[in-house]
Amino acid sequence: MAIVEVKVPQLSESVAEATLLQWKKKVGEAVAADEILIEIETDKVVLEVPAPAGGVLADILVGDGGTVVSGQTIARVDTEAQAGTVAAPAAAAAAAVTAPALAAASSAGGGVKAGVAMPAAAKLMADHGLDASAVAGTGKDGRITKGDVLAALATPKPAPAVAAPAAIPTGAPAKALPQVSAPVGLPPELMNRPEQRVPMTRLRARIAERLLQSQATNAILTTFNEVNMAPVIELRKKYQEKFEKEHGVKLGFMSFFVKAAVHALKKFPILNASVDGNDIVYHGYFDIGIAVGSPRGLVVPILRNADQMSFAEIEKAIADFGKRAAEGKLSIEEMTGGTFSISNGGVFGSMLSTPIINPPQSAILGVHATKERPVVENGQIVIRPINYLALSYDHRIIDGREAVLGLVAMKEALEDPARLLFNI
Protein backbone atom coordinates (compact mmCIF):
# COMPACT_ATOMS: atom_id res chain seq x y z
CA MET A 1 0.00 0.00 0.00
CA ALA A 2 1.35 3.41 -1.00
CA ILE A 3 -0.54 6.26 0.62
CA VAL A 4 -0.43 9.87 -0.59
CA GLU A 5 -2.03 12.58 1.52
CA VAL A 6 -4.44 15.18 0.15
CA LYS A 7 -3.81 18.49 1.88
CA VAL A 8 -5.43 21.91 2.01
CA PRO A 9 -3.58 24.38 -0.26
CA GLN A 10 -1.66 27.24 1.31
CA LEU A 11 -4.12 29.97 2.22
CA SER A 12 -3.19 33.64 2.33
CA GLU A 13 -2.03 35.19 5.61
CA SER A 14 -5.34 37.01 5.96
CA VAL A 15 -7.36 33.78 5.71
CA ALA A 16 -7.27 31.74 8.94
CA GLU A 17 -9.53 28.89 7.89
CA ALA A 18 -11.76 27.62 5.12
CA THR A 19 -14.76 25.37 4.57
CA LEU A 20 -14.95 22.20 2.50
CA LEU A 21 -17.87 22.29 0.08
CA GLN A 22 -18.68 18.84 -1.35
CA TRP A 23 -16.52 15.82 -2.12
CA LYS A 24 -16.72 14.83 -5.76
CA LYS A 25 -15.50 11.28 -5.04
CA LYS A 26 -16.44 8.65 -2.47
CA VAL A 27 -14.10 6.42 -0.53
CA GLY A 28 -13.21 3.42 -2.66
CA GLU A 29 -13.61 5.21 -6.00
CA ALA A 30 -10.77 5.56 -8.49
CA VAL A 31 -9.20 8.99 -8.95
CA ALA A 32 -6.82 10.28 -11.59
CA ALA A 33 -3.82 12.50 -10.93
CA ASP A 34 -4.86 16.19 -10.88
CA GLU A 35 -8.56 15.26 -10.89
CA ILE A 36 -10.49 17.75 -8.74
CA LEU A 37 -11.56 16.04 -5.51
CA ILE A 38 -13.22 18.91 -3.64
CA GLU A 39 -13.61 22.68 -3.57
CA ILE A 40 -12.60 24.74 -0.55
CA GLU A 41 -14.34 28.03 0.17
CA THR A 42 -12.53 30.82 1.97
CA ASP A 43 -13.97 34.21 2.79
CA LYS A 44 -12.53 35.49 -0.50
CA VAL A 45 -12.39 32.73 -3.12
CA VAL A 46 -13.16 29.11 -3.86
CA LEU A 47 -10.09 26.90 -4.34
CA GLU A 48 -9.98 23.56 -6.12
CA VAL A 49 -8.06 20.67 -4.56
CA PRO A 50 -6.75 18.15 -7.10
CA ALA A 51 -5.67 14.58 -6.43
CA PRO A 52 -1.87 14.57 -5.88
CA ALA A 53 -1.62 11.16 -7.60
CA GLY A 54 -3.75 8.56 -9.34
CA GLY A 55 -5.19 5.61 -7.43
CA VAL A 56 -8.13 5.01 -5.12
CA LEU A 57 -9.57 7.41 -2.55
CA ALA A 58 -8.72 5.43 0.59
CA ASP A 59 -9.98 7.74 3.31
CA ILE A 60 -11.81 11.03 3.84
CA LEU A 61 -10.71 12.69 7.06
CA VAL A 62 -12.83 15.84 6.84
CA GLY A 63 -16.31 15.65 5.35
CA ASP A 64 -18.57 18.13 3.56
CA GLY A 65 -18.93 21.38 5.46
CA GLY A 66 -15.84 20.79 7.60
CA THR A 67 -13.59 23.64 8.72
CA VAL A 68 -9.93 23.30 7.72
CA VAL A 69 -6.66 25.25 7.82
CA SER A 70 -3.63 25.55 5.55
CA GLY A 71 -1.70 22.32 5.07
CA GLN A 72 -4.24 20.16 6.90
CA THR A 73 -4.59 16.58 5.64
CA ILE A 74 -8.17 16.01 4.54
CA ALA A 75 -7.97 12.69 2.66
CA ARG A 76 -5.65 9.92 1.57
CA VAL A 77 -5.14 8.28 -1.81
CA ASP A 78 -3.84 4.72 -2.19
CA THR A 79 -1.79 4.74 -5.37
CA GLU A 80 -1.56 0.92 -5.55
CA ALA A 81 -5.15 -0.10 -4.79
CA GLN A 82 -7.89 -0.75 -7.33
CA ALA A 83 -11.37 0.74 -7.29
CA GLY A 84 -13.75 -1.19 -5.06
CA THR A 85 -11.03 -2.78 -2.90
CA VAL A 86 -10.98 -0.05 -0.26
CA ALA A 87 -13.56 -0.26 2.51
CA ALA A 88 -15.70 2.83 2.56
CA PRO A 89 -18.26 2.88 5.34
CA ALA A 90 -19.91 6.24 4.83
CA ALA A 91 -21.00 6.52 8.45
CA ALA A 92 -17.45 6.03 9.71
CA ALA A 93 -16.13 8.67 7.33
CA ALA A 94 -18.77 11.13 8.43
CA ALA A 95 -18.08 10.43 12.11
CA ALA A 96 -14.42 11.35 11.67
CA VAL A 97 -15.24 14.65 10.02
CA THR A 98 -14.26 17.72 11.98
CA ALA A 99 -15.29 17.37 15.58
CA PRO A 100 -15.86 14.78 18.27
CA ALA A 101 -19.25 13.16 17.69
CA LEU A 102 -21.77 13.90 20.38
CA ALA A 103 -23.98 11.10 21.60
CA ALA A 104 -27.29 11.03 19.79
CA ALA A 105 -30.08 12.16 22.06
CA SER A 106 -33.79 12.16 21.59
CA SER A 107 -35.86 15.23 22.29
CA ALA A 108 -38.91 14.89 24.48
CA GLY A 109 -41.26 15.83 21.71
CA GLY A 110 -40.21 13.94 18.62
CA GLY A 111 -37.11 11.78 18.99
CA VAL A 112 -34.94 14.08 16.88
CA LYS A 113 -31.23 13.19 17.03
CA ALA A 114 -28.65 15.85 17.81
CA GLY A 115 -26.06 16.41 15.09
CA VAL A 116 -22.31 16.31 15.22
CA ALA A 117 -20.87 19.50 16.67
CA MET A 118 -18.24 21.62 14.96
CA PRO A 119 -15.07 22.12 17.10
CA ALA A 120 -15.90 25.61 18.33
CA ALA A 121 -19.51 24.58 19.03
CA ALA A 122 -18.46 21.48 21.01
CA LYS A 123 -16.11 23.56 23.20
CA LEU A 124 -18.77 26.21 23.79
CA MET A 125 -21.34 23.59 24.80
CA ALA A 126 -18.84 21.96 27.17
CA ASP A 127 -18.01 25.33 28.76
CA HIS A 128 -21.70 26.03 29.43
CA GLY A 129 -22.75 22.48 30.27
CA LEU A 130 -25.22 22.51 27.39
CA ASP A 131 -26.53 19.19 26.07
CA ALA A 132 -26.49 18.59 22.32
CA SER A 133 -30.16 17.60 22.38
CA ALA A 134 -31.02 21.19 23.33
CA VAL A 135 -29.37 22.66 20.24
CA ALA A 136 -30.82 22.56 16.71
CA GLY A 137 -27.97 22.21 14.23
CA THR A 138 -28.19 24.25 11.03
CA GLY A 139 -24.94 23.07 9.48
CA LYS A 140 -24.36 20.40 6.89
CA ASP A 141 -26.23 17.19 7.78
CA GLY A 142 -27.53 18.76 10.95
CA ARG A 143 -24.11 19.66 12.35
CA ILE A 144 -24.15 22.11 15.22
CA THR A 145 -22.30 25.34 14.59
CA LYS A 146 -21.03 27.93 17.05
CA GLY A 147 -23.88 30.21 15.98
CA ASP A 148 -26.42 27.50 16.87
CA VAL A 149 -24.95 27.23 20.38
CA LEU A 150 -24.94 31.00 20.88
CA ALA A 151 -28.56 31.14 19.73
CA ALA A 152 -29.51 28.37 22.14
CA LEU A 153 -27.75 30.11 25.04
CA ALA A 154 -29.53 33.36 24.23
CA THR A 155 -32.95 31.69 24.23
CA PRO A 156 -34.52 31.46 27.73
CA LYS A 157 -36.72 28.51 26.86
CA PRO A 158 -35.52 26.89 23.66
CA ALA A 159 -38.09 25.26 21.45
CA PRO A 160 -37.86 21.47 20.84
CA ALA A 161 -34.79 20.73 18.76
CA VAL A 162 -35.48 19.96 15.13
CA ALA A 163 -32.96 18.39 12.79
CA ALA A 164 -31.94 20.98 10.20
CA PRO A 165 -31.80 20.14 6.51
CA ALA A 166 -28.50 19.51 4.83
CA ALA A 167 -26.87 22.72 3.64
CA ILE A 168 -27.91 23.50 0.10
CA PRO A 169 -25.02 23.28 -2.40
CA THR A 170 -24.14 26.52 -4.15
CA GLY A 171 -26.39 27.09 -7.14
CA ALA A 172 -28.98 24.51 -6.08
CA PRO A 173 -32.60 25.72 -5.87
CA ALA A 174 -33.89 26.17 -2.35
CA LYS A 175 -36.75 23.90 -1.37
CA ALA A 176 -39.41 25.30 0.89
CA LEU A 177 -39.61 23.59 4.28
CA PRO A 178 -42.68 23.59 6.53
CA GLN A 179 -42.50 25.91 9.52
CA VAL A 180 -42.57 23.74 12.64
CA SER A 181 -43.74 26.49 14.96
CA ALA A 182 -45.07 30.01 14.79
CA PRO A 183 -44.79 32.99 17.14
CA VAL A 184 -47.47 33.05 19.79
CA GLY A 185 -50.38 35.27 18.90
CA LEU A 186 -50.47 34.73 15.12
CA PRO A 187 -53.88 33.94 13.67
CA PRO A 188 -54.36 30.34 12.45
CA GLU A 189 -54.17 31.30 8.76
CA LEU A 190 -50.63 32.65 9.27
CA MET A 191 -49.28 29.52 10.95
CA ASN A 192 -47.40 26.61 9.36
CA ARG A 193 -46.20 28.68 6.40
CA PRO A 194 -43.06 27.46 4.58
CA GLU A 195 -39.69 28.89 5.54
CA GLN A 196 -36.10 28.08 4.63
CA ARG A 197 -33.04 28.58 6.83
CA VAL A 198 -29.67 28.32 5.06
CA PRO A 199 -26.35 29.26 6.71
CA MET A 200 -24.32 31.98 5.02
CA THR A 201 -21.35 30.80 2.99
CA ARG A 202 -17.95 32.05 4.11
CA LEU A 203 -17.82 34.39 1.13
CA ARG A 204 -21.27 35.86 1.86
CA ALA A 205 -20.43 36.26 5.55
CA ARG A 206 -17.18 38.02 4.61
CA ILE A 207 -19.03 40.34 2.23
CA ALA A 208 -21.47 41.22 5.00
CA GLU A 209 -18.60 41.87 7.41
CA ARG A 210 -16.76 44.14 4.98
CA LEU A 211 -19.90 46.14 4.15
CA LEU A 212 -20.61 46.74 7.83
CA GLN A 213 -16.96 47.67 8.32
CA SER A 214 -17.17 50.14 5.45
CA GLN A 215 -20.24 51.87 6.83
CA ALA A 216 -18.89 51.90 10.37
CA THR A 217 -15.42 53.28 9.57
CA ASN A 218 -16.00 55.58 6.58
CA ALA A 219 -17.84 58.90 6.43
CA ILE A 220 -19.56 58.01 3.16
CA LEU A 221 -21.11 60.64 0.93
CA THR A 222 -22.16 60.30 -2.73
CA THR A 223 -22.11 62.87 -5.50
CA PHE A 224 -23.92 62.41 -8.83
CA ASN A 225 -23.62 63.61 -12.39
CA GLU A 226 -24.97 62.69 -15.79
CA VAL A 227 -22.91 61.95 -18.87
CA ASN A 228 -23.90 62.03 -22.54
CA MET A 229 -22.64 58.68 -23.85
CA ALA A 230 -23.21 59.55 -27.52
CA PRO A 231 -19.51 60.23 -28.29
CA VAL A 232 -18.43 56.92 -26.74
CA ILE A 233 -21.24 55.04 -28.50
CA GLU A 234 -20.31 56.57 -31.86
CA LEU A 235 -16.61 55.86 -31.37
CA ARG A 236 -17.34 52.30 -30.33
CA LYS A 237 -19.66 51.75 -33.27
CA LYS A 238 -17.07 53.13 -35.69
CA TYR A 239 -14.21 50.90 -34.53
CA GLN A 240 -16.00 47.86 -33.06
CA GLU A 241 -15.49 45.57 -36.03
CA LYS A 242 -11.83 46.49 -36.58
CA PHE A 243 -11.12 46.33 -32.85
CA GLU A 244 -12.54 42.83 -32.48
CA LYS A 245 -10.75 41.62 -35.60
CA GLU A 246 -7.44 43.02 -34.40
CA HIS A 247 -7.60 42.04 -30.72
CA GLY A 248 -10.01 39.11 -30.59
CA VAL A 249 -12.26 40.77 -28.03
CA LYS A 250 -15.26 43.09 -28.26
CA LEU A 251 -14.88 46.76 -27.46
CA GLY A 252 -17.14 47.32 -24.48
CA PHE A 253 -17.97 50.36 -22.38
CA MET A 254 -16.07 49.36 -19.24
CA SER A 255 -12.68 50.11 -20.79
CA PHE A 256 -13.85 53.70 -21.36
CA PHE A 257 -15.02 54.01 -17.75
CA VAL A 258 -11.71 52.61 -16.48
CA LYS A 259 -9.72 55.03 -18.64
CA ALA A 260 -11.91 57.95 -17.58
CA ALA A 261 -11.52 57.00 -13.91
CA VAL A 262 -7.72 56.81 -14.17
CA HIS A 263 -7.76 60.17 -15.98
CA ALA A 264 -9.61 61.74 -13.03
CA LEU A 265 -7.50 59.99 -10.37
CA LYS A 266 -4.36 61.49 -11.89
CA LYS A 267 -5.90 64.94 -11.62
CA PHE A 268 -7.14 64.38 -8.06
CA PRO A 269 -4.78 61.91 -6.31
CA ILE A 270 -6.78 62.05 -3.07
CA LEU A 271 -9.47 59.94 -4.78
CA ASN A 272 -6.84 57.23 -5.21
CA ALA A 273 -5.63 57.43 -1.60
CA SER A 274 -6.51 55.47 1.54
CA VAL A 275 -6.55 55.98 5.29
CA ASP A 276 -4.13 54.15 7.58
CA GLY A 277 -4.69 55.20 11.18
CA ASN A 278 -4.04 58.92 11.26
CA ASP A 279 -2.13 58.85 7.98
CA ILE A 280 -3.26 59.40 4.40
CA VAL A 281 -1.54 57.02 2.00
CA TYR A 282 -1.19 58.40 -1.54
CA HIS A 283 -0.72 55.58 -4.02
CA GLY A 284 1.61 56.18 -6.96
CA TYR A 285 -0.12 53.47 -8.98
CA PHE A 286 -3.65 52.80 -10.19
CA ASP A 287 -5.05 49.39 -9.25
CA ILE A 288 -8.70 49.51 -10.25
CA GLY A 289 -11.13 47.02 -8.72
CA ILE A 290 -13.93 45.82 -11.00
CA ALA A 291 -16.99 44.59 -9.10
CA VAL A 292 -18.16 41.31 -10.62
CA GLY A 293 -21.27 39.36 -9.64
CA SER A 294 -20.92 35.59 -9.21
CA PRO A 295 -23.20 32.78 -8.04
CA ARG A 296 -21.42 32.85 -4.67
CA GLY A 297 -21.55 36.62 -4.20
CA LEU A 298 -19.89 39.85 -5.25
CA VAL A 299 -16.14 39.75 -5.87
CA VAL A 300 -13.79 42.58 -6.83
CA PRO A 301 -10.77 41.45 -8.89
CA ILE A 302 -8.10 44.09 -9.53
CA LEU A 303 -6.76 45.56 -12.77
CA ARG A 304 -3.13 46.14 -11.76
CA ASN A 305 -1.49 49.29 -13.16
CA ALA A 306 -4.62 50.11 -15.13
CA ASP A 307 -3.02 53.35 -16.32
CA GLN A 308 -0.53 51.29 -18.34
CA MET A 309 -3.14 49.02 -19.91
CA SER A 310 -4.56 49.46 -23.41
CA PHE A 311 -8.28 49.33 -24.17
CA ALA A 312 -7.84 45.79 -25.50
CA GLU A 313 -5.95 44.63 -22.41
CA ILE A 314 -8.64 46.05 -20.15
CA GLU A 315 -11.46 44.37 -22.11
CA LYS A 316 -9.65 41.01 -22.13
CA ALA A 317 -8.96 41.20 -18.41
CA ILE A 318 -12.55 42.08 -17.52
CA ALA A 319 -13.93 39.29 -19.72
CA ASP A 320 -11.56 36.85 -18.04
CA PHE A 321 -12.57 38.06 -14.58
CA GLY A 322 -16.25 37.55 -15.37
CA LYS A 323 -15.71 34.02 -16.66
CA ARG A 324 -13.53 32.86 -13.78
CA ALA A 325 -15.73 34.55 -11.17
CA ALA A 326 -18.67 32.47 -12.42
CA GLU A 327 -16.51 29.35 -12.11
CA GLY A 328 -15.14 30.33 -8.70
CA LYS A 329 -11.58 30.26 -10.01
CA LEU A 330 -10.32 33.73 -9.11
CA SER A 331 -7.27 33.63 -6.85
CA ILE A 332 -6.96 35.46 -3.53
CA GLU A 333 -4.08 37.54 -4.89
CA GLU A 334 -6.24 38.82 -7.75
CA MET A 335 -8.72 40.31 -5.27
CA THR A 336 -6.26 41.74 -2.77
CA GLY A 337 -5.48 45.44 -2.65
CA GLY A 338 -6.84 47.98 -5.10
CA THR A 339 -6.84 51.77 -4.87
CA PHE A 340 -10.21 52.58 -6.48
CA SER A 341 -13.23 50.54 -7.62
CA ILE A 342 -15.90 50.64 -10.32
CA SER A 343 -19.29 48.99 -9.89
CA ASN A 344 -21.45 48.60 -13.00
CA GLY A 345 -25.04 48.12 -11.89
CA GLY A 346 -26.14 49.13 -15.37
CA VAL A 347 -25.67 45.58 -16.66
CA PHE A 348 -28.61 44.62 -14.43
CA GLY A 349 -30.70 47.64 -15.43
CA SER A 350 -29.95 49.91 -12.47
CA MET A 351 -30.80 53.56 -13.10
CA LEU A 352 -29.22 55.08 -10.00
CA SER A 353 -27.55 53.82 -6.82
CA THR A 354 -25.11 54.84 -4.10
CA PRO A 355 -22.19 52.37 -4.26
CA ILE A 356 -20.49 51.46 -0.99
CA ILE A 357 -16.74 51.95 -0.59
CA ASN A 358 -14.54 48.86 -0.70
CA PRO A 359 -12.13 49.16 2.27
CA PRO A 360 -9.40 50.30 2.56
CA GLN A 361 -10.13 52.38 -0.54
CA SER A 362 -11.64 55.83 -0.20
CA ALA A 363 -13.81 56.14 -3.30
CA ILE A 364 -15.85 54.08 -5.76
CA LEU A 365 -17.55 54.90 -9.06
CA GLY A 366 -21.05 53.59 -9.72
CA VAL A 367 -22.03 53.18 -13.39
CA HIS A 368 -25.63 52.67 -14.45
CA ALA A 369 -27.78 51.82 -17.44
CA THR A 370 -27.51 54.15 -20.43
CA LYS A 371 -31.00 55.27 -21.50
CA GLU A 372 -32.29 57.79 -24.01
CA ARG A 373 -33.50 60.80 -22.05
CA PRO A 374 -34.58 64.36 -22.86
CA VAL A 375 -31.90 66.95 -22.12
CA VAL A 376 -31.50 70.64 -22.88
CA GLU A 377 -28.74 71.69 -25.29
CA ASN A 378 -28.43 75.28 -26.49
CA GLY A 379 -31.93 76.02 -25.30
CA GLN A 380 -33.44 73.06 -27.17
CA ILE A 381 -34.83 69.80 -25.80
CA VAL A 382 -33.06 66.88 -27.47
CA ILE A 383 -32.84 63.14 -26.88
CA ARG A 384 -29.46 61.81 -25.79
CA PRO A 385 -28.17 58.48 -24.38
CA ILE A 386 -27.61 59.45 -20.75
CA ASN A 387 -25.82 57.56 -18.00
CA TYR A 388 -26.04 58.67 -14.39
CA LEU A 389 -22.71 58.36 -12.60
CA ALA A 390 -22.37 58.15 -8.82
CA LEU A 391 -19.14 58.67 -6.89
CA SER A 392 -19.18 57.59 -3.23
CA TYR A 393 -16.24 58.92 -1.22
CA ASP A 394 -14.84 58.97 2.29
CA HIS A 395 -15.44 62.48 3.54
CA ARG A 396 -12.77 62.06 6.23
CA ILE A 397 -10.06 62.73 3.66
CA ILE A 398 -11.94 63.74 0.48
CA ASP A 399 -13.70 67.08 0.43
CA GLY A 400 -16.76 67.73 -1.66
CA ARG A 401 -14.74 69.89 -4.04
CA GLU A 402 -12.35 67.08 -5.00
CA ALA A 403 -15.16 64.56 -5.27
CA VAL A 404 -17.33 66.76 -7.49
CA LEU A 405 -14.43 67.89 -9.69
CA GLY A 406 -13.19 64.30 -9.97
CA LEU A 407 -16.56 63.12 -11.20
CA VAL A 408 -16.76 66.06 -13.60
CA ALA A 409 -13.34 65.06 -14.98
CA MET A 410 -14.70 61.56 -15.66
CA LYS A 411 -17.79 63.03 -17.30
CA GLU A 412 -15.73 65.31 -19.55
CA ALA A 413 -13.43 62.45 -20.58
CA LEU A 414 -16.41 60.30 -21.59
CA GLU A 415 -18.16 63.11 -23.45
CA ASP A 416 -14.93 63.94 -25.30
CA PRO A 417 -12.80 60.74 -25.46
CA ALA A 418 -10.02 62.60 -27.26
CA ARG A 419 -9.11 64.06 -23.86
CA LEU A 420 -7.87 60.60 -22.89
CA LEU A 421 -5.35 60.69 -25.74
CA PHE A 422 -3.97 64.10 -24.84
CA ASN A 423 -4.44 63.85 -21.05
CA ILE A 424 -6.32 67.14 -20.83
Image (cartoon, rainbow, N blue to C red):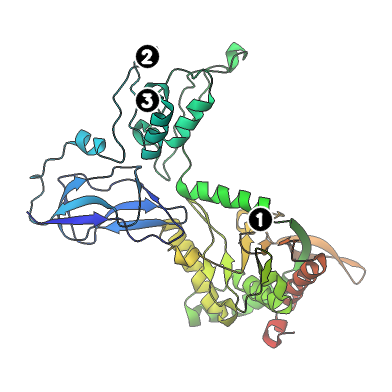
Q: Earlier in the sequence, mark 2 or mark 1?
A: 2
- Mark 3 residue crowding within 10 angstroms, few (<14) / some (14–19) / many (20+): many
Q: Which residue is mark 3?
A: 132
Question: Visible in this render: residue 192?
Answer: yes
Q: Disc 3, disc 1: CB below 8 Å? A: no
Mark 2 vs mark 3: give the one in front. 3
Relative side of 20 to 285, left or right: left
The x and y percentages for residue 326 are 45, 57
Q: Amino acid at mark 3?
A: Ala
The dot on residue 356 is 1
Q: Quadrant of the C terminus?
A: bottom right
In three-dimensional space, the C-alpha distance between marks 3 and 1, rounded to whole angstroms, equals 41 Å
**Vertical relation: 305 (above or below) 183:** below
Q: Amino acid at mark 2?
A: Gly
The x and y percentages for residue 215 are 67, 51
SS category of the residue bearing label 2: loop
- The quadrant holding residue 419 is bottom right
Q: Amino acid at mark 1?
A: Ile
Q: Earlier in the sequence, mark 3 or mark 1?
A: 3
**Vertical relation: 190 (above or below) 48:** above
Q: Earlier in the sequence, mark 2 or mark 3?
A: 2
In three-dimensional space, the C-alpha distance between marks 2 and 3, rounded to whole angstroms, equals 15 Å
Relative side of 326 to 117, left or right: right
The dot on residue 110 is 2
